[in-house]
Image: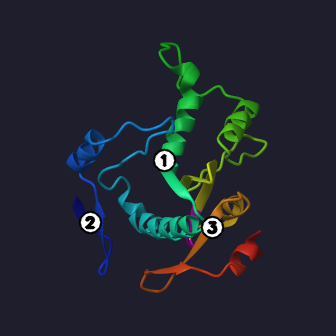
Amino acid sequence: MQTVRLDRDNTVVTLTKEGRGLLESRRLADDSRERQAFHDSVQKPRELKHDAELYRAYMDEAERLRDEGANIHRVVLENDLKAEYQEFLQERNRDRDDSDGRPDRDPLEIQDWAREHDLPCDDQGHVQFPDVRIEYDIEGRDHTLDVEVMTPHYRGAHAAAKSGSGFRLYFIARSGGGRGGGRTPSIIEELLR
């Protein structure tokens, strides 16, 4: 593990490459579900505060789900969903010397992929990805919950798209000092819908 200074008052902890390797080496044989992905280091330092807020939102949702009797199986980050999407987009380009690297998927194919992955997609084939997807079951029935942390930086069409996505939204208010304010009342969610 390593610590990384978030700001003057906060420090976060992340895995090192060695820590990730240790976790990977200790995996038990799972059932047929997808395996939990582990990540090391800070991938995008500019998004560290957002990611810390995302962790808080996840913890709130995980507690709520467990109170409802849920068994959480896996957490999938936005980057992991986007990587799977890119694999789909580039599938026809793999191992082709004549490929220009541009995906040749039409909007209907993209919409089908999004539907298969329970992700919102518009008519032009623009897929919305949540910050985090929580996969869980209650009484043996599988479910997913998509969570998006909305900061004051979300504006215009981007904010409208996220608001209309069906994701569980967490609104983060920032004070002048830049510290997280936590989840705002749901009245804001209602105004944006």
Circle 3: element type:
strand
For residue 190, above or below residue 92: below
First in sequence: mark 2 or mark 1?
A: 2
- Residue 17 horizontal side relative to residue 140, left or right: left
Q: Which residue is farthest bottom?
A: 176
First in sequence: mark 3 or mark 2?
A: 2
In depth, the one of 46 and 75 nearer the eye is 75
Q: Which mark is residue 169?
A: 3
Q: Quadrant of the N terminus?
A: bottom left
Mark 3: few, some, or many residues within 10 Å (few <14, many ≥20)? many
Q: CA distance from mark 3 to mark 1?
A: 18 Å
Residue at image x 61%, y 66%?
68
Image coordinates of residue 104 in percent, x first then y, are 65, 25
Image coordinates of residue 91 in percent, x first then y, are 56, 24
Query: Would you name the residue on which mark 1 appears?
Result: 79
The amino acid sitting under disc 1 is: Asn
Q: CA distance from mark 2 to mark 1?
A: 21 Å
Q: CA distance from mark 3 to mark 2?
A: 27 Å
In depth, the one of 135 and 132 nearer the eye is 135
Label tally = 3
Query: Would you name the residue on which mark 2 appears?
Result: 4
Magenta part mainly helix, strand or loop?
Answer: strand
Image coordinates of residue 169 in percent, x first then y, are 63, 67
Circle 2: element type:
strand
Residues in magenta?
148-152
Figure quadrant of residue 163: bottom right
